[in-house]
Image: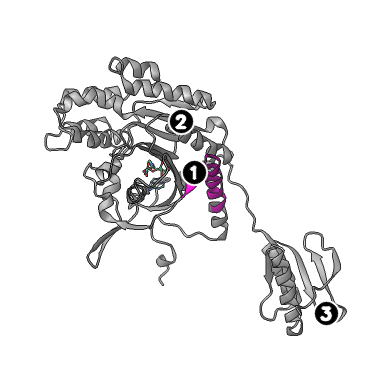
């Protein structure tokens, strides 16, 4: 192995014990919140049918696919979980109790150009509701998202959510698409790039006669200008009279008010999201300063199942990555210190004490304690120093003298205090 190969492939991570403790801490918070909201955990394979992701809307995620041909199969590492969920729902459609509340914490793979908080693998907490067309589902999901940032120790002002409704946009552009309804997804994908590539490049893509959107330049300009709207009153100004999308957004804010969360959420016309399958309300959570990429993102995708060949079923959900939240917690000094938990080390001085040591270790383990049994022959000084380094609470010192008396010497490592304890009886 060359020196360069000691690092994992670029954009991927090794998890040493201290890293894994932190990851487990994070996942436990996700799981705990999901359970509080009555969601059940699911998972799907890391390797999927590549065709699940072959959408033609110009989404980045499709170009970033890790995929390969094996025998006659075209397979891919999942870049996101949503299409797998759709496959799972479709496979049991008709037999599932709706609305379905499912959560998962999959590792996802995207061959990204690496920037801060963007990596080639990440874990993503997913929360999805299937089979509920009403905006009460969005409200419940947003409440769960904030329950997680709260559980992670972030103050209410530290993460904000921006929401929009794709149908508000659609109401304005549909008459201009000349019946080409399929151009709406690609249009959203292009608008989502505004921050990244700038207004001029976005206008060019929207108005490219050979592109999938093909708007006239003035219409494209009007559309991009409209992205500056902030706050519901402004949204109302741009909306068609009696707009159902606006009514839904207004209802969402009323519901969020009941959860005590309305003041953490803003209407923002520039949030469109980069995935083509969203059809309704979309949202993104970011750090209040907006200096990091999105902590979480989601929305309603009522037509994904149909697009994969299933029967129509409304759905809404979000994905919440592990990488950005880690950066935010670190920046805020809120990553917890998670020392290793080791209750005891059991040390037989010589092989003559080995079976008594084994019985002692097994007795302690049966009580649920975390116990390291010293393996092989080790000098007492080294065994003590090593137990200290491991962060053990106690060490059980078992020498010939103790064994003869049927006891073991217990030393509390922090205080150095010692006492004798009776050895457990050998099994009959
Ligand atoms: P997404 O916006 O692509 O949505 O990803 C959701 C979150 O996953 C992002 O906000 C970010 O925290 C994290 N994430 C995504 N890509 C990366 C990356 N390369 N490195 C680090 N973190 C990343 C989806 O994937 C949708 N499937 C979410 C969803 C579920 N929508 C409905 N249900």
Q: In which quarter of the image is ligand 1?
A: top left
Percent coordinates x, y for residue 222 in the rendering: 23, 22
Q: Residue drawn at (73%, 78%), measured in percent from left and top?
A: 379
Residue found 43% across the figure and 52% down from its top: 106
Magenta stretch secondary structure, dominant: helix
Residue on which the image places disc 1? 39
Quarter of image, res 186: top left
Left or right, residue 356 beside residue 125: right
Question: Residue drawn 38% across and 16% down?
Answer: 233
Point out the image quarter for the C terminus: bottom right
Front residue of 92 and 333 = 92
Q: Is mark 1 on a helix, strand or loop?
A: loop
Q: What stretch is highlighted in magenta?
A: 24-41
Residue 403, numbered circle: 3
Q: Say which residue label 2 marks.
A: 139
Q: Circle 2 sits in a helix, a strand or a loop, which is it? A: helix
The image's colour scheme reads one colour
272 over 367 or under it: above or below? above
Label 1, residues with CA under 10 Å away: few <14, some 14-19, many ≥20 = some
Q: Can you see residue 287?
A: no
CA distance separating discs 3 and 2: 64 Å
The 10 Å Cα crowd at callout 2, few under 14, some 14 to 19, many 20 or more, is many
- Answer yes or no: do the residues labelled 2 and 1 have beta carbons within 8 Å? no
Q: Is mark 3 within 8 Å of ligand 1?
A: no
Compared across the picture, whether 145 is left or right of 131 comes to right
């Amino acid at each position: 192995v060359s020196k360069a190969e000691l690092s994992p492939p670029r954009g991927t991570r090794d998890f040493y014990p201290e890293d894994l403790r932190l990851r487990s801490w994070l996942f436990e918070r996700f799981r705990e919140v999901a359970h509080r909201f009555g969601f059940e955990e699911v998972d799907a394979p890391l390797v999927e049918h590549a065709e699940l992701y072959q959408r033609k809307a110009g989404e980045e995620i499709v170009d970033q696919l890790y995929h390969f041909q094996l025998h006659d199969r075209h397979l891919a590492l999942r870049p996101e979980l949503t299409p797998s969920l759709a496959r799972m729902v479709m496979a049991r459609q008709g037999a599932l109790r709706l609305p379905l509340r499912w959560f998962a914490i999959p590792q996802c793979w995207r061959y990204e150009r690496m920037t801060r908080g963007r990596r080639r693998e990440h874990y993503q907490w997913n929360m999805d509701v299937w089979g509920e067309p009403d905006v009460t589902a969005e409200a419940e999901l947003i409440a769960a998202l904030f329950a997680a940032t709260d559980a992670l120790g972030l103050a209410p002002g530290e993460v904000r959510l921006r929401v929009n409704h794709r149908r508000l946009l659609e109401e304005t552009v549909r008459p201009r698409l000349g019946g080409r309804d399929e151009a709406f997804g690609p249009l959203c994908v292009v608008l989502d790039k505004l921050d990244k590539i700038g207004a001029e490049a976005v206008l060019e893509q929207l108005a490219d006669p050979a592109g999938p959107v093909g708007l006239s330049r003035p219409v494209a300009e009007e559309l991009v200008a409209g992205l500056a709207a902030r706050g519901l009153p402004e949204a109302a100004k741009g909306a068609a009279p009696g707009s159902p999308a606006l009514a839904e957004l207004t209802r969402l804010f009323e519901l969020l008010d009941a959860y005590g969360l309305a003041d953490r959420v803003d209407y923002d016309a520039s949030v469109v999201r980069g995935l083509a399958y969203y059809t309704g309300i979309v949202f993104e959570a970011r750090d209040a300063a907006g200096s990091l990429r999105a902590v979480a993102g989601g929305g309603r995708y009522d037509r994904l199942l149909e697009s994969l060949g299933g029967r129509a079923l409304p759905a809404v959900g979000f994905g919440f990555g592990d990488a950005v939240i880690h950066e935010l917690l670190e920046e805020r000094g809120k990553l917890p210190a998670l020392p290793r938990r080791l209750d005891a080390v059991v040390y037989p001085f010589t092989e003559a004490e080995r079976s008594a040591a084994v019985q002692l270790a097994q007795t302690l383990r049966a009580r649920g304690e975390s116990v390291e049994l010293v393996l092989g022959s080790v000098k007492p000084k080294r065994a003590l120093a090593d137990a200290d380094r491991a962060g053990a609470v106690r060490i059980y010192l078992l020498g010939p003298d103790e064994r003869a008396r049927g006891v073991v010497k217990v030393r509390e490592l922090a205080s150095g205090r010692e006492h004798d304890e009776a050895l457990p009886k050998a099994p009959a």
